[in-house]
Amino acid sequence: MRMSFGKGEAPMSIDYYAPTLVEQISSERVQANTLAVWWLGQASFVIKGADAVIYIDPYLRVSDRRLTPPPFAPSAVTNADLVILTHDHGDHVDPETLPELAAASPRARFIAPRPIVGRVADLVGGSGRVVPAIVDDPLHFALNGTSVEIIPVPAKHEEFDQTDLGYPYLGYTVRLNGVCVHHSGDTIPFEGQIERVKAHGVDLALLPINGRDFYRTRAGTIGNFDYREAAEYAVQIGASVVIPMHYAMFRGNTVPPGHFVSYLGDFFPEQSAHIMGRYSKYVHVKSR
């Protein structure tokens, strides 16, 4: 098993990172068949292919509940071309992040599950900036001369909670710059999930590992894949590399990523994984 570990950094104030990290993302040169990925904590990522910059579930508020500070203020995000949102929970659709980010990146558009389009529109300045996401209905964009395809897939955040407008919880497969990356959103396993996503030909999978249990559910904390389920899912969809997410943000709703690594080493030593350091970069080069 090939494992690579990102270099962690000591906690700093947001002034240290902003605007330095945003500038780094903007200036990063990304070759063909390559994707640069930054982890902002929890389920928040930035992905860049060619000159297209996409934020996924940006969670940038300052809060005493966080175990790690945000990497930069939302107002520092001047480089977003597209913002993808998986579901309306505060660490995914953050009402403190989205208005400032939308103002700082006035050309950015926001993709959101159709049932929450109105909610997102209120946060980002109008429905004209929001694109509704519907399961299995691909979306296509040209961002700074780069073609992007986004395929929404259902997520089961313990329940589907499907409405007449569709699924309120989504994952997304993104094809960008010759690389296929799948962000599962917050989800647990369900029938048909593997087959649907495996057909996309995933190169890089971003999967939650924080799990769920009786006590968290009773306290109102809705769960996700545990580390075993995330490992099994990554292998069964055929991902070349898997990055675990959704841990180390809130006390009581986290798990050591080493559990995920150990499970892969014991049962799937052929599966490559990358453990992200805080606010670090991973560069994925398509290998097949």
Image (cartoon, rainbow, N blue to C red):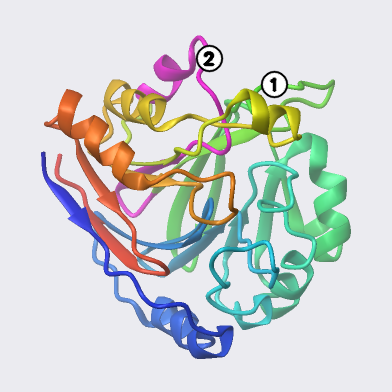
**Does residue 272 appear left or right of residue 245 in this picture?**
left
Task: Residue 85: give x, y in percent of width and height.
Answer: 65, 49
Instruction: Name the residue nearer the viewer: 207 or 168.
Output: 207
Which residue is located at x 70 percent, y 45 percent?
112
Q: Tell me whether the residue at label 1 lies in contact with that at label 2, contact meaning CB atoms closer than 8 angstroms.
A: yes
Instruction: Name the residue nearer the viewer: 140 or 106.
Output: 106
The quarter of the image holding the N terminus is top left
Task: Residue 54: give x, y in percent of width and height.
Answer: 51, 60
Q: Which residues are the magenta region? A: 176-199
Amino acid beneath label 2? Phe
**Does residue 164 appear left or right of residue 260 in this picture?**
right
Whole-Å distance between the Cαs marked 1 and 2?
Answer: 10 Å
Q: Which residue is mark 2?
A: 190
Asked which secondary structure carries label 1, the reply is loop
Which residue is located at x 53 percent, y 67 percent?
68
Query: Relative to 269, does residue 150 appear above or below in the rendering?
Result: below
- Any magenta on residue 14? no
Task: Residue 207: give x, y in percent of width and height.
Answer: 43, 39
Which residue is located at x 39 percent, y 46 percent?
256
Amino acid beneath label 1? Phe
Label 1 CA crowd tier, 10 Å (few <14, some 14–19, many 20+): some
Which residue is located at x 57 percent, y 66 percent?
81
Q: Which residue is mark 1?
A: 160
